[in-house]
Amino acid sequence: MKALVTGGTGFIGSHLVEALIKYGYDVSCIVRNPSRLRFLQGLNVNLIKADLSDKNSLRKVDWDFDYIFNISGVTKATHPEEFFQSNYIGTKNLVETVAEVNPSVKRFIHVSSLAAVGPCINGSPVTEQTEPHPVSEYGKSKLLGEKAVEFFKNKIPVTIIRPPAVYGPRDSDFLTFFKFINKGFIFYFKEGVYSLVYIDDLIEGIILATHSDKAVSECFFIADNQPYTTEEIIRVISDALKKNPLKIKVSENIAKIFIRVFQKFNKRSIINTDKLKELIQPCWVCSTEKAERMLGYKSKIKLKEGILWTAKWYKTNQWI
């Protein structure tokens, strides 16, 4: 079985590459910058230099693959256009090319985000039937990426995976919150409740969807089936780091000022004005009922265990 992974050098993509190799796949990765391969070191992976934003470069690729996994995307940017260029245009170029030159592909798996749908309405978990209402530019770009994939569902077999916030070893987004807590304080903007997913559970959900005929032309939320409050998340990270941080709740207006200042020092942090549009929402919970019923998916890693493993990895690799 031959598989192609975009975004294989990143957090989610590198974990997926490892899993596919264990399952016996012959794995190739499209990489834009071959020098950024730290998470693929030592793995038996074929590297293909191409750029999803350049459709001409994609046409030069030999598309003889059974499975294609589109993990590539941008979660933080200095300008909204970057989200749309990567999460929409890049996805559109990829799926169009595959439909043109490899219509016999067995599956095109696209990893989207809960942000493409938006937060809970009236406190009820969102489902695959919820009308999308993204609140951030990131979420809007991910929704457009989904629509680009759905457009070709009658030409190639597609499946869309929507994880909530993903955490685990190699993640640089949650790392920001670990760093704050490790320094003895944490800012938060809203008492909320969230769906999360540990990286191993997400990868298992992706693999289950790949191997299931029922997943063709379907979309699934893959998450921990237990949501967590802001207080729980802070406490679990604090316990893992053996810290007792000062918890500072700030208003939306103060948060905007804080983020503008913060971005001057770290332009590509997950703490940004676009992410604030999501952070001020009180409920980001999705239902995994469909994935459990159709795929046999069941989350295994709860927050305490997953955060502890993540903290240990950060410390071992001197990220904190």
Image (cartoon, rainbow, N blue to C red):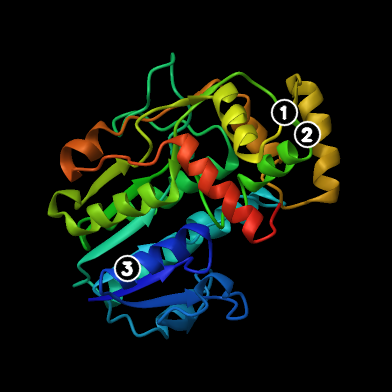
Tell me: residue 235, above or below residue 178. above
**Residue 89: horizontal and vertical position, in percent?**
50, 60
Residue position marked by numbered label 3 in the rendering: 20
Residue position for label 1 = 244
Direction from residue 19 to residue 49 in the image, left or right: right
User: Badge 2 is on which residue?
Assistant: 184
Q: Mark 1 or 3 closer to N-term?
A: 3
The amino acid on which the numbered mark 3 sits, given as a three-letter code, is Leu
Number of marks drawn: 3
Where does the N terminus fall, quadrant-wise? bottom left
| Camera-side mark, 2 or 3 | 2
Secondary structure under tag 2 reads loop
- Location of residue 189 by image quarter: top right
Q: Is residue 151 visible?
A: no
Q: Residues within 10 Å of mark 2 (few under 14, many from 20)?
A: some
**Spatial distance from mark 1 to mark 2, Cα to Cα?**
7 Å
Determine whether the residue tagged by mark 3 lies in a helix, strand or loop: helix
Q: CA distance from mark 2 to mark 3?
A: 39 Å
Label 1 with label 3: CB-CB less than 8 Å:
no
Q: Is residue 277 above or below residue 160?
A: above
Residue found 43% across the figure and 41% down from its top: 197
Q: Mark 1: give few (<14), some (14-19) or many (20+) Cα within 10 Å.
A: some
Left or right of residue 35, residue 289 in this image = left
Of the residues under marks 1 and 2, which one precedes in the sequence? 2
CA gap, disc 1 to disc 3? 40 Å
Q: Residue at x 66, y 45 (%)?
A: 270
